[in-house]
Image (spheres, grey):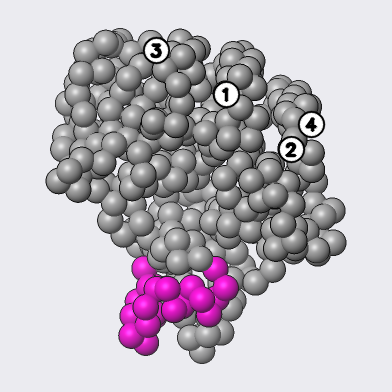
Amino acid sequence: MKKYISCGIPYLDKIMGGILLGDNVVWIVEPGTYSDYFLEKFLTAQDHRSLKNIYVSFDFPPQKIRDRYECFFDQNDFILVDAFTFGKGKDDKYFKSFYDRESIRSNPNIICIKDMTEPEEFINTMSELQGKFKDDFLCKYVFDSLTGMQELWGERNALHFFTYTCPKLFELKALAYWPIVKGAHSESFLAHVMHITQLVIHLSFEQDKTCVAGFLKMDGRPSNLLCDNHSYLFESNNIKFTGPAEILTEKGSIENKIFQQPGTPKRALYAKNKGPFQLGDRIRDARLKKHMAQIEMARILKITPSALSQIENNQCLPSLQLFIEIARYFEESLDSFLAGTTIISKTSKTKKWGDKFSEH
């Protein structure tokens, strides 16, 4: 029986049935299509199995990646491979200052590639990670830019890494996202990528300001799914598709009904005998009573507006330390947010990265 994992966006899950273990997903993206939020949804989608999330950054400094994802994971569940600081960051002291703290330098889950002139050190690091987690963990990989890799090492080396790594991750039953910028690669490069990978999705920006997603390759799925484009909007820090989606069933047939992946955990907290309880709603209500903008509160809490939005939309829980700071700011007790109910978690454990990765 095929094993599907949610991509984090229910609409796309309805179309393709989720992502199969071993799938490499290439995203051909245009500017303005919010491709980073597709990656965020993929990384933060819940699963009942043990997960290792490995983010390989070529285009963004480690500080930005940490700020964006720190509220989602325990520190042992997220590994950051920094290929930016000594790559496109050009060894700049501003980016290197991220490692000034001993707690960052000594964190085994933050890996900085210091020799980016050639791909050798990077390839060795990735091979070590793949060997370390090959047996006991389901691994999600995000290589945030094949385009950035090509800018550093040229088309030949970038393609060599992809054509070597993609089949390896398939055999390891890992999941991987590979974004590339439309128009930044040769036809030969794209042809090789299309041939090797399992899923290819394009994101484009239409003249009427509508974003569109479409499938260019879908191994193991019916070919008629390649015919249609799917319009979406970006609202409230979320991707929202604007039309109905068809569902790919395990028998290969298409049905137009609500998709629910077997074993997908629910995202709400539940107050015993009182139905859904959403901590984020109460945090948002407290903020609105002060007539405070989300960006202003995020600045006070020293987190990103995106992280605060995820909390208020009940997509992740604040760490205990952050929860205490929120209550202290509003001059309320923790109990006032919990309203005296007995809380039972139906999703992940409290998100807590600890002092080694985050200091509020």
Identify the amino acid type marked 1. Answer: Glu
Task: State the mark number for residue 121.
Answer: 4
- Magenta run includes residue 83: no
Q: Residue at x 36, y 27 (%)?
A: 201
Mark 4 → mark 3, Cα distance in angstroms: 32 Å
Can you tell which of label 1 and label 3 is closer to the viewer? Answer: 1
Q: Residue at x 57, y 73 (%)?
A: 302
**Residues drawn in magenta:** 281-303
x and y percentages locating residue 80 in the rendered image: 67, 45
Can you tell which of label 2 and label 3 is closer to the viewer? Answer: 2
Task: State the mark number for residue 155.
Answer: 1
Asked where in the image residue 159 lies, by quadrant, the reply is top right
| Residue under pointer 3 | 219
Left or right of 134 in this view: 141: left
> If the image is split into quadrants, where does the C terminus sit?
bottom right
Identify the amino acid type marked 2. Answer: Met
Mark 2 → mark 3, Cα distance in angstroms: 34 Å
Q: Secondary structure at mark 3?
A: loop
